[in-house]
Amino acid sequence: MLIVSLPFPPLPVVCIKSCDSNYSHASGHDLLSVAIASMIVGKDNKAGFDSMQVLERKQSIVIELNDRIAAVWGTHEKDNENSALEECYEIFCTQFRLYMGCYPGSCDIRIMDMDSVCASDIIVKQAIGHLNAMASTFTDEAGSVDKFQIPLNSTNCYKTLIRLYVLGIYSLSRETPVVAQNHRIEPHDADTQCP
């Protein structure tokens, strides 16, 4: 439930496969869920899971992420959408590293670029699942959840999914809090094929 409430997409975090010592990537959502679990049940939780200072830091990171992405996407030129999307992706990466710094462990988190994620990667399925879970969580009208669900076979393009995250943040930044609660980005608002 904690990850559903966060705007971070599953990012491709650099890791090494133990079987062949080659670089690969793992999901940032998996890394975050392990960090949360370690903080809750681990012995090295001196800062305290619900320390007010930690909570305020996390909140400021998420607010800054939302503000920066909304500013970049709101000022990009129509013909510059790819560069704006890359800039927004870098913001996701930077803010994710800062957020992970609120948990015990190394802050040296390396994240691969969007093009490194293949259509068959679990990260794509996690992104679709996360977007659907957010829609389910924040949609309050009976029966309207299906309207905002992204079918698992609708897209396999990671860039398209990142664009949906950006559009969601930007859309919510332009609305009043009451309207924002009831508004979700529909799949047709973003291309379903990679450029």
Image: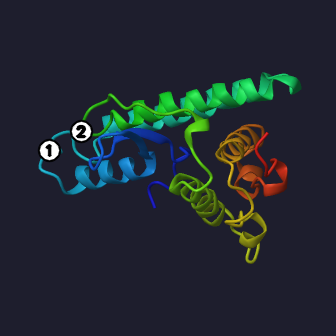
- In the rendered image, which quarter contains the C terminus? top right
Judge by depth and name the residue closer to the eye, 53 or 94.
Answer: 94
Specify few, some or many for label 1: CA neighbours under 10 Å numbering under 14, 14-19, or 20 or more: few
The residue at which mark 1 appears reads as 44
Is residue 4 in sight in this rendering? no
The residue at which mark 2 appears reads as 104
Residue that extends furthest to the right in the rendered view of this protein: 78
The image quarter in which residue 150 lies: bottom right
Q: Which mark is residue 153?
A: none
Precedes in sequence: disc 2 or disc 1: 1
Is 111 above or below relative to 20? above
What amino acid is labelled 1 in the image? Answer: Asp
Q: Residue at x 60, y 32 (%)?
A: 89
Tag 2 near tag 1, CB within 8 Å? yes
| Element marked by disc 1 | loop
Q: Position of residue 132 (x, y in %)?
A: 64, 62
Q: Position of residue 47 (x, y in %)?
A: 21, 39
What amino acid is labelled 2 in the image? Answer: Pro
Q: Residue at x 76, y 55 (%)?
A: 183
